[in-house]
Image: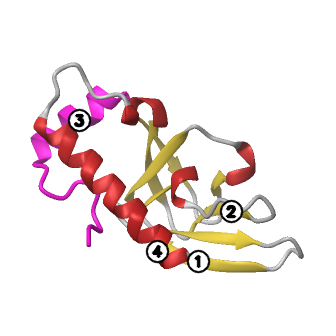
Amino acid sequence: MTENVFLNISDSEKEKLLTCLGTMNRSYSKGEIIYRSSDKNDYIGIITSGKAHVTCVDFEGTQSVLETLSESGVFGEMFMLPMDQFGYYVEADSQCMVCFIRSDSITKPCRNACEYHCTFLGNLFAMAAVKARNLS
């Protein structure tokens, strides 16, 4: 089970990969909302430092924490259950740094077809499969 999207990717390959993917980084304070499913974002987020949690809000307004995210934790639309009556949000539990990657830059391989890019995609989809199984 892959729990780190950068598994088997060296630090130098990680830097090249993040540049290739055109990532952007943002800092969040404790209690700040990082992501809302209702915003229909077209990116995934990776926690690079700090902690956050994913909360589900059902049609009655009941809130349930689904998971806690720490370094290398991933979130975004592809990691949530596709149920329109539920809302999801990610909230910072501490000072957090988040790396955002546009979804379309993930689905289109780079022109160099880097081995570490393929490793990253494999790790990402393995994580998505595990999360989907755990959430169902």
Tell me the residue at 18%/58% (across/down).
Answer: 7
Spot occupied by residue 81 in the image (x, y as percentages of width and height): 61, 64
- What is the spatial separation of the Cα atoms under label 1 and label 3, in whole angstroms? 29 Å
In the image, residue 34 above or below residue 22: below
Q: Is the C-beta separation of discs 4 and 2 under 8 Å?
A: no
Crowd rating for badge 1 (residues with CA inside 10 Å; few <14, some 14–19, many 20+):
some
Q: Is residue 73 visible?
A: no
Image-quadrant location for residue 30: bottom right
- Judged from the image, the secondary structure of the residue bearing numbered disc 4 is helix
12 magenta-colored: yes
- Judged from the image, the secondary structure of the residue bearing numbered disc 3 is helix
Could you tell which of marks 2 and 3 lies nearer the N-terminus?
A: 3
Residue under label 1, please give it.
66
Magenta region: which residues? 1-23
- What is the spatial separation of the Cα atoms under label 1 and label 4, in whole angstroms? 13 Å
Residue type at mark 1: give it. Answer: Leu
- What is the spatial separation of the Cα atoms under label 3 and label 4, in whole angstroms? 28 Å
Nearer the observer, 96 or 61: 61
Residue type at mark 4: give it. Answer: Arg
Q: What number is the disc on residue 17?
A: 3
In the image, residue 54 above or below residue 114: below
Residue type at mark 2: give it. Answer: Tyr
Image-quadrant location for residue 135: bottom right
Residue under label 4, please give it.
133
Crowd rating for badge 4 (residues with CA inside 10 Å; few <14, some 14–19, many 20+):
few
Residue under label 2, please give it.
88
Q: Is residue 40 visible?
A: yes
